[in-house]
Image: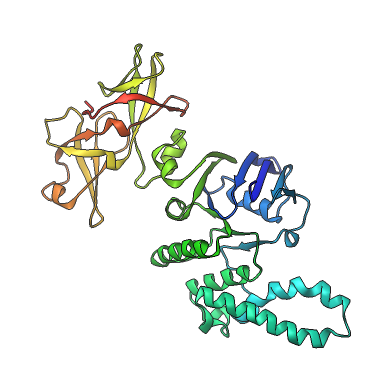
Amino acid sequence: MSAIALEGIEKSFGATRVLGGVDLDIRAGEFLTLVGPSGCGKSTLLRILAGLEAPDRGRVLIGGAEVTGLRAAARNLAMVFQSYALYPHLTVAENMMTPLKLRDLPRAARLPVLGPLLARDRYRALRAEVDRTARILKIEPLLDRKPGQLSGGQRQRAALGRAMVRNPVAFLMDEPLSNLDAALRVHMRAELSELHRRLGTTFVYVTHDQAEALTMSDRMAVMQDGAILQTGAPEEVYADPDSLDVARFVGSPAINILPGRIDGTGGLGALGTALGRFRTTDAQKVAIGLRPEHLSLAPAGASGFEGAVRHRENLGADVFLHVDVEGIDRPVVLRTTPTETRDLAIGAAVGIDADARAALVFDETGRRLRFEAAELVRIA
């Protein structure tokens, strides 16, 4: 049984349809990331799961029980927002204790006479929970500070601590790292992954940053225009996308898209050279996707697939070479090394080899076509 299930979720705001019948199963204890461009509906889906928005149609189930009509506080889900949403006038410890106090309010209201005595003992118990969580997050020295005295990373840990003390069924995180600088984002990605491994609790994480999805997730769900295009392990989605939209969104630098065609025998032609054979024999135009790591330099004149160097992007161990090729709208990008490109000047003529075994081929609708067989060739 799934820890969380979303079934047929639809949502519109006025005449704008945001979610169009989304189905998603989230496994107990997994780190699942909803990733997609801004406006694709991922945050709305998370808010519906949290109980902060009501779907127009569909059901939300947690542990097999339907919770669609339950208010957010009754779902035992912890939300971590992009803005952290810490109370500025409270210390970190008081912020972390707030959800525990709110959880105790009904009981305190039923026992007004014993309230003060119970409050003293209960405070000690709550503070013990706060201290335990602070040790896990390594924020004990910050407990007596207020949010204004904390760095971005420290505020993020405090917000996580406030969520953790409730021992929720799942953590829901809406772009929690977007306010941090680049170096701190990388550090916090590792921290969150480690925290997930230690807690073993379900994480549902929303981001537009594919690097976060690829590096942190057990599974990722790629969204576009209110629909989930593909769900799978990060390496699966990257290497084996089901559609051209997924292939273009996942990967940095972006995948190279080359024009091609399938002839009447099922052979694939790309700029004049056959790359493989397909299950279809229908003649049609196709798009051929090759990631930068599946292209390599060849001497000028040794390959029919040639171009001129437009830009050399040096990232230290890797160099991404941007090459203008006649007949292709955007520069072709290939991954190489500083040694291979040391003597290449801007404008230099180069040849390019392609590993056809790694080629991804899509029909005119963007649907993925599959190879039966292929071998290493030069594109000509």
Is 81 placed above or below 133 here? Answer: above
Residue 138: give x, y in percent of width and height: 50, 77
The structure's colour scheme is rainbow
Which image quadrant for residue 370? top left
- The number of discs equals 0
Residue 362: give x, y in percent of width and height: 41, 28
Q: Is residue 36 visible?
A: no
Q: Residue at x 32, y 37 (%)?
A: 330
Is 377 placed above or below 25 here? Answer: above
Residue 338: give x, y in percent of width and height: 17, 52
Q: Residue at x 63, y 52 (%)?
A: 46
Image position of 256 (left or right of 98): left
> Residue lying furthest front in this view?
1
Residue 159: give x, y in percent of width and height: 58, 70
The quadrant the C terminus occupies is: top left
Is 300 placed above or below 266 here? Answer: below
| Front in this rendered view, residue 321 or 67 | 67
Q: Is residue 56 visible?
A: yes
Q: Residue at x 44, y 36 (%)?
A: 241
Which image quadrant for residue 236? top left
